[in-house]
Amino acid sequence: MNPDSLLAMPGFLLPLRFTVSSTGFVPFTVGPLTVSFPSVLVATPKSMHFAEVLPLRSGASIRAYDLSYETYGELNADKSNAVLICHALNASHHVAGVYLDADGGVMAKSEGWWDTMIGPGKPVDTNRFFVIGVNNLGSCFGSTGPMQVNPDTNAIYGADFPVVTVQDWVSAQARLLDALGVQTLAAVMGGSLGGMQALAWTLQYPERVRHAAVVASAPNLTAENIAFNEVARRAIVTDPDFHGGHFYQHGVLPKRGLRIARMIGHITYLSDDVMNDKFGRQLRQPVAQKVDIGESGAGPEQASSAFQGDRVVNEEKGVGVFKYSTQDVEFEIESYLRYQGDKFAEYFDANTYLLITRALDYFDPAGEFGGDLSRALAKASAKFLLVSFTTDWRFAPARSREIVKALLDNQRDVSYAEIDAPHGHDAFLLDDARYLGVVRSYFQSKVAV
């Protein structure tokens, strides 16, 4: 089968997976697989300080910074089983496992953000691999970021924190691996923005990466994606409490802007099908409406779902008359987005949001090669697994196929799976047996050391 013709297809779905290499596409089934029963994985946060200056792509630099990280499993004798996990926009170094409280009990809702993927007996099996999760510079989950003190001024960085790029994060991660005694990665893996970091690893340190797993990602952002990021940033910087990014000095937080930014972002993470199936046009609190069944002649069954003009009364389905308000929550989807926005604004830092979305905008390895992605990826020597999801419209399957084709142009070993999943971009975080089966198969058959 011609690889280019297959790439042009709308998608090839499990239970078949297609391995792509310089010799073409070879279909094979995902199973049988070796699966062990998982046990509880206890996570322990760690931090490492780096005094040396880290040069940044902007020409700026940062010194005396900390990186928060966690490790799972054991590094083998020849240090060949390390797997680095790169996180997306609002995730952290807490990739897998749970935290324990002071009494030794499992803390509620303390599971790592990719706990379905990583752990004992899971697709990335910590009984086999030494897994490393690191929080990136500029984040707000422990590594040095805008909320920390600038050692040069003894004041909180705030808006003065230097702009960082995906490549800068990879450089910092490489220093952490050096300190941990890991020179070569069995694999680097990430979804979304994390996938961009995995791709960058194969270009910046090709000799240090044997495999790269790039999930629900892209070689750069489209204009539409940059536009979404810009609207979210404007929501933050125009919040009266933003104070040019130095809101810490004023004892306030730009929560209104963060809420809107999160609401915008969350819309792009879900598919239209998921939103319609979960919320549809259901009202949050339908207004009770009386129906004169005597005059209409409707019986009890008809009265429970009676029409009056374009208004429907059906409290069991959450459908009722409107409040006719421009300020109150009317629809369930509005309530859901407001909840997501409120929750996000309580724990995420506004300056971090600006930094990370800008790093997304800037990433474009082909930009240095006149837009030629094949030339940009020529230096990559790792073997690749790429996964995309059919309803992911923010990082559409076509973007993954661009990477696949560029790697094939360089005769690299590539495996690609396009999963028919309804969940949109968030699918890479969810428990989908077909998706997890692809990753498990790849790590067992190719990455295993």
Image (tube, helix red, strand yellow):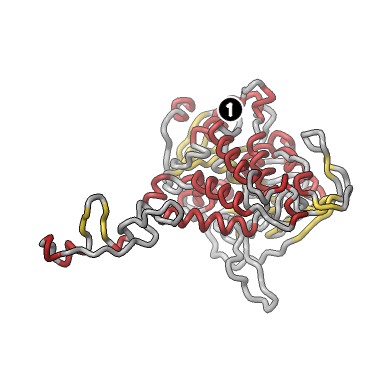
- In x, y percent, where is residue 113? 59, 57
The residue at 71%/59% (across/down) is: 74
Against 95, is 59 above or below?
Answer: above
Tell whether 305 sits left or right of 59: left
Against 124, is 192 above or below?
Answer: above
The residue at 44%/56% (across/down) is: 328
Please name whichever residue, 317 or 121, is drawn nearer the observer in this view of the structure: 317
Tell whether 189 sits left or right of 169: left
Q: Secondary structure at mark 1?
A: helix
Please name whichever residue, 60 or 327, is drawn nearer the observer in this view of the structure: 327
Q: Is residue 346 visible?
A: yes
User: In which quadrant will I find the N terminus?
Assistant: top left
Q: Is residue 174 visible?
A: no
Please name whichever residue, 301 or 202, is drawn nearer the observer in this view of the structure: 301
Against 386, is 241 above or below?
Answer: below
Q: Residue furthest bottom?
A: 103
Q: Residue furthest top?
A: 370
Q: What's the residue type where badge 1 is placed? A: Ala
Badge 1: few (under 14), some or many (20 or more) residues near its Cα, within 10 Å? some
Tell whether 336 sits left or right of 146: left
- In x, y percent, where is residue 298? 13, 62
Residue position marked by numbered label 1 in the rendering: 406
- In x, y percent, where is residue 229? 59, 40
Please name whichever residue, 319 or 36, is drawn nearer the observer in this view of the structure: 319
Q: How many marks?
A: 1
